[in-house]
């Protein structure tokens, strides 16, 4: 299999280099570039086309949350993981709303980080149990208030349920006997109908609506 192509974005050069060394030692990863702030990240992402971007929050010129929104607008396919010292709910919710697929704190164990990055590369959300619970509570509450599920078709509900269980597009397609491209089309319709921006938000919505028992499992 091709390695997961990762770009690292952090204003602390020592941390970037240390993380790059860790990823270089772990099979299945290739660090294709580094950036010291969000503006540089936007420029390099367009040039390097990484699979996954590991992004800090607090940086000069352009912070990580702003950069995440800009990169997702220009390169929707790129999967972004926030890796920061900040555990504030506000940053977590803003990151998810901006399109980040993961939110991790820098005290994470390297083995757990590798697994989370692999999950993101497969199209799954990367959140600790605590962070996932916060996302479910917040976005699920908003979903109940503002985004009724009545407009979803039966097939879209089935897709949404599997998304909330952490299934990838390939796994959803196999379970429902449809192509991955059809799954992607269903996901686009689901997000548009519910006015959501990411699979993580969709999973939180499904849990809150009672379509599944636990999105973090």
Image (cartoon, rainbow, N blue to C red):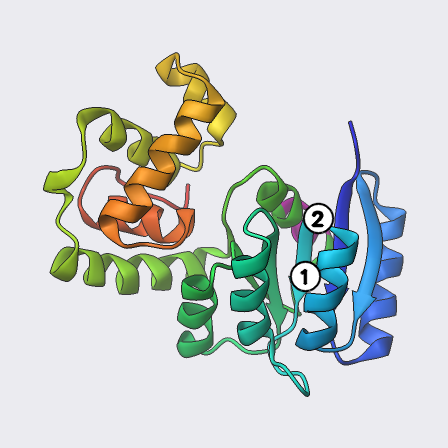
Magenta-colored span:
111-115
Tell me the SS state at disc 2: helix
* Residue 84 falls inside the magenta stretch: no
Disc 1/disc 2 C-alpha distance (Å): 12 Å
Residue 112 is left or right of residue 183, and the answer is right
Q: Is residue 161 above or below residue 203?
A: above
x and y, in percent, of residue 53 in the image: 67, 58
Which residue lies under the disc numbered 2? 114
| Residue 146 circle label | none
Identity of the residue drawn at 26% across and 37% down: 212
Left or right of 160? Residue 112 is: right
Examine the image and state in which quarter residue 83 appears: bottom right
Residue at 15 percent of width and 43 percent of height: 149
Viewer-proximal residue among 46 and 103: 46
Residue beneath disc 1: 54
Crowd around label 1: few <14 · some 14–19 · many ≥20 (10 Å): many
Between tags 1 and 2, which lies in front? 1
Q: Position of residue 154 (x, y in %)?
A: 18, 26
| Residue 26 is at least partly visible in this image | yes
Name the residue: 67% across, 83% down.
Answer: 59
Of all residues shown, which one is farthest toward the top? Answer: 177
Residue 41 appears at what percent x and percent y? 71, 68
Apparent side of residue 174 relative to residue 116 in the rendered image (left or right): left
């Amino acid at each position: 299999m091709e390695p997961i192509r990762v770009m690292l974005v952090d204003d602390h050069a020592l941390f970037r280099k240390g993380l790059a060394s860790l990823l270089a030692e772990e099979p299945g990863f290739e660090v294709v570039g580094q950036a010291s702030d969000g503006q540089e990240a936007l420029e390099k992402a367009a040039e390097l086309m990484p699979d996954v971007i590991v992004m800090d929050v607090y940086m000069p010129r352009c912070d990580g949350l702003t950069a995440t929104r800009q990169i997702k607008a220009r390169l929707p396919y790129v999967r972004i993981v926030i890796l920061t010292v900040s555990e504030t709910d506000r940053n977590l919710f803003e990151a998810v709303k901006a399109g980040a697929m993961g939110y991790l704190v820098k005290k994470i164990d390297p083995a757990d980080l590798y697994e989370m990055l692999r999950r993101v590369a497969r199209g799954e959300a990367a959140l600790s149990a605590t962070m996932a619970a916060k996302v479910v509570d917040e976005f699920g509450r908003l979903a109940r208030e503002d985004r009724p599920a009545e407009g979803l078709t039966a097939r879209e509900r089935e897709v949404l349920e599997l998304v909330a269980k952490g299934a990838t597009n390939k796994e959803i397609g196999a379970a429902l006997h449809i192509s991955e491209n059809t799954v992607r089309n269903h996901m686009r319709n689901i997000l548009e109908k519910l006015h959501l921006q990411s699979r993580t938000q969709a999973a939180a919505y499904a849990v809150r609506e009672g379509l599944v028992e636990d999105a973090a499992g």
